Amino acid sequence: MSIRTKIIQKLVHINEGVFFYPKLKKFYKENLINQHINILDVGANKGQSIDFFKRINQNINVHAFEPNKKLFSFLLNKYKTTTNVKLYNFGVSNIKGDLVFHENILDETSTFEELNLESKYLEKKAKILGVSKENLIVDNYKVEVIRLSDFINENPHISFDVLKIDVEGHELKCLQGLFSDENKVMPIRFIQLESHKDDMYLSNSQHQDIEKILVKHGFEIAAEFKHGFGDFAELIYVNKRK
């Protein structure tokens, strides 16, 4: 990673700490009042969400998925003495098998989705990072992916307080994999995911489909928090059937 990219990444994290996380913290402080909380973290990156929820409640159990092989090694080292954080080097989708993972120069935006090379937003982002849009992807490799419905069925004793999904355009497929059983009520209270209004990914026109699948399975919007940069927000849905 270049010095320029590291500086931009650092500025993004500072921005998030000032404008985004305080609002998110207030919401969960008011709503996660259980003595113990269980978190399902899809797209763990460097553990930002893990650390965030640990600051809210030390009595936390986290199951975190991160397909990026370099970041997974980082997470293993970071949480090697933390017994209540379980890490999985899998991706999450609507199938059980393998998918090609596209590792981005800015690791927070790595994805299973194809970039839209006609996107003006993508072009602007590439200029900020000092690379061509064709060179934003630094590596491609196959990753094992699972369905969340299978993971939940394999862990029937766990009721999750929060499912956080940060998968850069792959949200709909994650939800399709979660709700593969049309009749099952998911043991999840809140689902948190990003809503992008840019066209960076070829798949990034699925907002209505995402809303439809969540509403169909008993979830309704509980909060929306704008990020401090970019044209996207964090949406939190609450399970009205639970």
Image (cartoon, grey):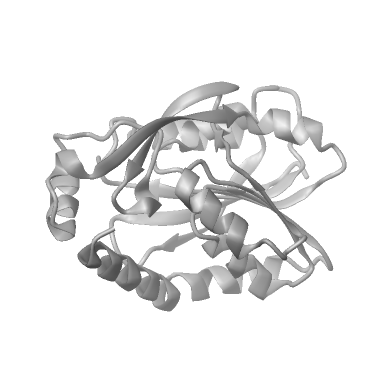
With respect to residue 129, does 89 lie above or below?
A: above
100 and 193: which one is in front? Answer: 100
Q: Number of numbered discs present?
A: 0
> Image point 81% across, 38% down: which residue?
155
Q: Is residue 10 left or right of residue 177?
A: left
Picture quarter with the C terminus:
top right
Q: Where residue 36 sits: x, y (%)?
A: 82, 64
> Image point 42% across, 34% down: which residue?
208
Whether residue 81 can be seen here: yes
Residue, far bottom: 18
- Classify residue 216 by image quadrant: top right
With respect to residue 117, does 95 lie above or below?
A: above
Picture quarter with the N terminus:
bottom left
- Classify residue 156 by image quadrant: top right
- Classify residue 26 by image quadrant: bottom right
Q: Where residue 192 sits: x, y (%)?
A: 56, 51
Whether residue 95 can be seen here: no
Q: Where residue 22 sits: x, y (%)?
A: 51, 76
With respect to residue 208, does 46 lie above or below?
A: below
> Image point 72% across, 34% down: which residue?
151
Q: Is residue 16 left or right of residue 77?
A: left
212 and 1: which one is in front? Answer: 1
Q: Where residue 73 sits: x, y (%)?
A: 54, 52
> Image point 58% across, 41% down: which residue?
89
